[in-house]
Image (cartoon, rainbow, N blue to C red):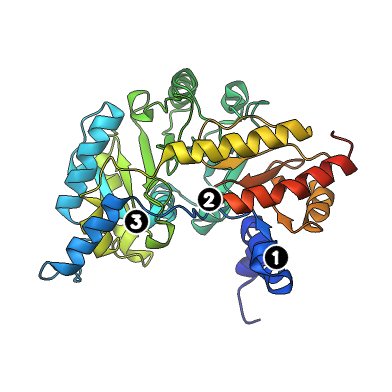
């Protein structure tokens, strides 16, 4: 065989997001780009903020000697200082550069974290719906994923979490604001989750990490507050990225941050840096590290995303779709009008509207629609949504 059995198996169950995106590419070739309303990929069409563009232009016009060379694998000290300073403001905990490692986006950060902490067969608990690549990341490092349900508002059931934790549980991986649901876990939920982890650590004489994947942290609406996980649990590590709040997904820049009081802090940081190198990431992109240190606290227009959310939500709700209004991120996760969401998605495709099946996020019977798209794409999708709603007697 040309490729390994494990890779072949993983490819067969690969991301539905990418599968549907590729369907969209083929459809665009047939009917034209302007006639396809692709809501599959969380690929922001919004441009980066002007502050980012200005700093990038300044750097290119006034290059720093050696700025394209290797640096220490953890990243430039000055960049880590800037990230630590912003984290201290945002999280209510004092960070230093020694708590931060720059990474090639949040995906690389998660892989470095999981590679560092997991022994073969140890479990990582995730809550459905979840970003589909989590299962691949855990499998990359010989761990196993245990999937737990959430309630009707996509908030974790902590009684089920407590019952699910075993001596093999090494971490709980959360994502709030959530992809694909847009749910945000409030401070009480995070507090109660931390209490469960502390209780189970004592009962089982083990160590359980809370890994928080936070690329959408700054994209929240209606005065929603995203609580600081660091204020509730010491054995906490976050993976973050500037892909979403600065609209830079192609630049692959993010970081890992560890609670300053996390037990075995130095071992963890040394492990993350080692894995950053040996997994082949080596270091985060140099130019992006120079730019990022100057644009801490800057984001794209959150009001613009809220406007897009309100537009799509109000129209889908008026058509009869059952959905929870997202509090953050830039996705909606409505129920499919048919138990088999693939039937619904195929019907939508007849009107050149593309969404992602909920099965890809561990939650069959739903679908994800991204609204980080241009207005004409969102507006153009409405006819298809309405026609299919009428077919399934939603309105």
Measured as percent of width and height from the top left, residue 8 is found at: 65, 69
- In space, the residues marked 2 and 1 are separated at their CA atoms by 31 Å
Measured as percent of width and height from the top left, residue 287 is found at: 24, 63
Is residue 321 visible in the rendered image? The answer is: no
At numbered mark 1, what does the secondary structure look like: helix, strand or loop?
helix
- Relative to 18, say whether 66 is above or below: below
- Relative to 276, say whether 144 is above or below: above
At numbered mark 3, what does the secondary structure look like: helix, strand or loop?
loop
Horizontal arrangement in the rendering, residue 208 relative to residue 182 (left or right):
left
- Label 1, on which residue? 23
Q: Nearer the viewer, residue 284 or 144?
A: 284
Of the numbered discs 2 and 3, the one sitting upstream in the chain is 2
Q: Nearer the viewer, residue 304 or 263?
A: 304
Q: Residue visible at 18% across and 56% down?
A: 76
Q: Nearer the viewer, mark 2 or mark 1?
A: 1
Q: Residue visible at 79% across and 56% down?
A: 351
At numbered mark 2, what does the secondary structure look like: helix, strand or loop?
loop
Horizontal arrangement in the rendering, residue 37 relative to residue 216 (left or right):
right
- Label 3, on which residue? 253
- Asked if labels 1 and 2 touch by Cβ distance under 8 angstroms, the answer is no
- In space, the residues marked 2 and 3 are separated at their CA atoms by 25 Å
Crowding at label 3, few (<14), some or many (≥20) Cα neighbours within 10 Å? many
- Label 2, on which residue? 143
């Amino acid at each position: 065989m040309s490729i390994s059995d494990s890779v072949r198996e993983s490819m067969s169950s690969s991301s539905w997001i990418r599968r549907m995106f590729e369907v969209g590419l083929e459809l665009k070739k047939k009917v034209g780009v302007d006639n396809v309303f692709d809501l599959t990929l969380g690929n922001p069409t919004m441009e980066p903020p002007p502050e980012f563009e200005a700093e990038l232009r300044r750097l290119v016009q006034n290059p720093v000697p050696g700025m394209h060379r290797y640096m220490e694998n953890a990243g430039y000290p000055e960049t880590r200082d800037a990230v630590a300073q912003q984290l201290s403001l945002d999280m209510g905990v004092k960070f230093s550069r020694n708590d931060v490692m720059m990474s090639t986006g949040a995906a690389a950060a998660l892989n470095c974290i999981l590679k560092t902490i997991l022994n073969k067969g140890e479990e990582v608990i995730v809550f459905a719906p979840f970003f589909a690549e989590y299962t691949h990341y855990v499998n990359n490092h010989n761990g196993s994923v245990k999937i737990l349900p959430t309630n009707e508002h996509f908030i974790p059931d902590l009684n089920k979490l407590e019952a699910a934790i075993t001596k093999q549980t090494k971490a709980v991986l959360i994502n709030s604001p959530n992809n694909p649901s847009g749910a945000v876990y409030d401070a009480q939920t995070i507090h109660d989750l931390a209490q469960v982890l502390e209780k189970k650590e004592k009962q089982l004489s083990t160590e359980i990490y809370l890994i928080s994947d936070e690329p959408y942290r700054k994209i929240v609406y209606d005065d929603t507050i995203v609580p600081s996980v660091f204020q509730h649990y010491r054995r906490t590590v976050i993976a973050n990225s500037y892909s979403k709040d600065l609209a830079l997904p192609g630049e692959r820049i993010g970081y890992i941050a560890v609670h300053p009081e996390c037990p075995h802090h130095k071992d963890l940081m040394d492990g993350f840096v080692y894995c950053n190198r040996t997994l082949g990431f080596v270091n985060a992109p140099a130019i992006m590290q120079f730019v990022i240190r100057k644009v801490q606290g800057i984001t794209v227009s959150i009001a613009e995303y809220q406007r897009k959310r309100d537009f799509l939500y109000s129209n889908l709700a008026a058509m009869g779709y059952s959905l929870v209004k997202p509090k953050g991120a830039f996705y909606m996760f409505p129920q499919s009008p048919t138990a088999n969401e693939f039937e619904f998605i195929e019907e939508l495709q007849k009107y050149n509207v593309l969404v992602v099946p909920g099965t890809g996020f561990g939650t069959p019977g739903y679908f994800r629609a991204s609204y980080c798209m241009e207005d004409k794409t969102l507006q153009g999708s409405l006819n298809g949504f309405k026609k299919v709603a009428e077919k399934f007697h939603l309105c």
